[in-house]
């Protein structure tokens, strides 16, 4: 034999020396659900271990997040039914829960990178990411309100706005709005290749945002498509996105790799609520070892080409990384 590949697997020290993929806590982006009120830490039934937080309790939680070396959060607001309406105008209220949360976090933890979700589903009585008319999702009217929403978040101090809606032309419109308003320090993390996936179910439980009619297939991508993902990310880079994202992550590792090879901006991938729930549920049944599944799933996403990983497992993974040191 000329080659015995097992030599490089002989001992842990050798395996680590030749390891091709590594990740650290600073690669993680932790999604956070925020609720109006006080003293709220309510667990999401389909996402055991993940909570909706009121701002007063979030402060302590974020201290422990930072202590673990996680330095960026992605904020989502749970909007009460009474504030949802067809015009989705709560989305552009400067005193709304999301702008308030951005200001709160940037004031308490200036070093935390705060990213904010930009889409209309939490504000829409229909649970759709865009404005609805006659059962259709309006593109250009939605883009207009998303641009205003981005401006509000940027004014509140968001480091990045993160449009997750998949309307056409929104990155260009958001970039222009930020420029026009001299908000030149705010970045755009675009959900560029977001698929119409079954894996968002637990998230929609968390925000009570399941679509009231139909599905999201007229704006989110067909899971069968690959070339379309490249087109979407290229468009977003051309329109001014600083970071592009592929979502979900685990079922779409091929897409992450192709995107990484095709463009020259940082690539993020979102290990979504359903991916979290799958691991949790099998671990709860004793069918998988949770810690191993967490590390292997995240390592695979990184290996596929993601520079940044949005994951509900950020804290757990950071703890495991710390233990292994
Ligand atoms: C909606 C949005 C969704 C997620 C992030 N932003 C759900 C959807 O598109 O219906 C899903 C995240 C997850 O499942 O963890 N703008």
Image (tube, grey):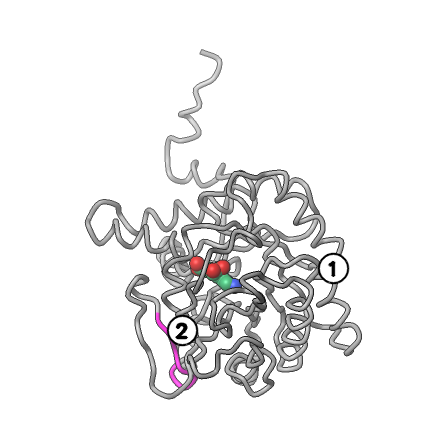
| Residue sitting farthest toward the top | 1
The answer to whether 131 is drawn above or below residue 4 in the figure is below
Q: Looking at the image, is 283 positioned above or below residue 113? A: above
Count all numbered tags in the image, as a single digit: 2
Residue 25 visible? The answer is: no
- Please give the name of the residue rendered at 62% of the width and 77% of the height, measured from the top-left corner: 153
Q: Is mark 1 within 8 Å of ligand 1?
A: no
Q: From the viewer's perspective, tell me whether residue 185 is left or right of residue 302.
A: right
Q: Which marked residue is nearer to the observer: mark 2 or mark 1?
A: 1
Q: Nearer the viewer, residue 233 or 49?
A: 233
What range is drawn magenta here? 51-57
Q: Which residue is mark 1?
A: 240
What's the distance in space between the residues labelled 2 and 1, CA to CA?
A: 34 Å
Residue at 43%, 36% (x, y): give it: 14
At 43% from the left edge and 65% from the top edge, which residue is drawn? Answer: 212
Residue where numbered disc 2 is placed: 64
Q: Residues within 10 Å of mark 1 (few under 14, many from 20)?
A: some
- Tell me the element at label 1: loop
Is 56 contained in the magenta span? Answer: yes
Report x, y in % for residue 117: 55, 68
Residue 292, x across and y down, in percent: 32, 47
Q: Residue at x 76, y 53 (%)?
A: 238
Above-or-below relation of 247 to 5? below
Q: Nearer the viewer, residue 109 or 136?
A: 136
């Amino acid at each position: 034999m000329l080659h015995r590949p097992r030599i490089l697997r002989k001992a842990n020290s050798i395996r680590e020396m030749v390891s091709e993929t590594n990740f650290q806590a600073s690669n993680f982006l932790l999604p956070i659900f925020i609720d109006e009120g006080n003293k709220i830490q309510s667990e999401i039934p389909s996402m055991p271990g993940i909570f909706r937080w009121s701002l007063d309790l979030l402060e302590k939680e974020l201290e422990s997040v930072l202590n673990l070396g996680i330095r960026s959060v992605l904020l989502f607001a749970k909007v009460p039914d009474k504030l949802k309406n067809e015009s989705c105008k709560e989305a552009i209220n400067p005193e709304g829960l999301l702008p308030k949360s951005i200001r709160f976090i940037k004031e308490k933890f200036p070093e935390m990178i705060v990213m904010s979700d930009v889409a209309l589903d939490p504000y829409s009585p229909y649970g759709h990411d865009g404005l609805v008319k006659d059962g259709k999702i309006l593109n250009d009217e939605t883009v207009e309100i998303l641009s205003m929403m981005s401006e509000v978040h940027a004014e509140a101090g968001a480091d990045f706005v993160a449009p997750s809606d998949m309307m056409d032309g929104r990155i260009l419109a958001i970039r222009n709005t930020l420029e026009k308003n001299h908000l030149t320090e705010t970045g755009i993390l675009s959900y560029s290749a977001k698929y119409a996936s079954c894996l968002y179910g637990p998230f929609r439980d968390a925000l009570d945002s399941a679509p009231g009619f139909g599905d999201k297939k007229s704006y989110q991508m067909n899971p069968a498509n690959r070339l379309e993902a490249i087109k979407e990310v290229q468009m977003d880079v051309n329109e001014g996105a600083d970071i592009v994202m592929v979502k979900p992550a685990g079922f779409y590792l091929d897409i992450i790799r192709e995107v990484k090879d095709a463009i020259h901006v940082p690539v993020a991938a979102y290990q979504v609520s359903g991916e979290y729930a799958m691991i949790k549920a099998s671990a709860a049944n004793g069918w998988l070892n949770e810690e191993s599944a967490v590390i292997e799933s995240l390592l695979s996403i990184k290996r596929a080409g993601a520079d940044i990983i949005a994951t509900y497992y950020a804290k757990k993974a950071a703890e495991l990384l710390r233990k292994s040191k």
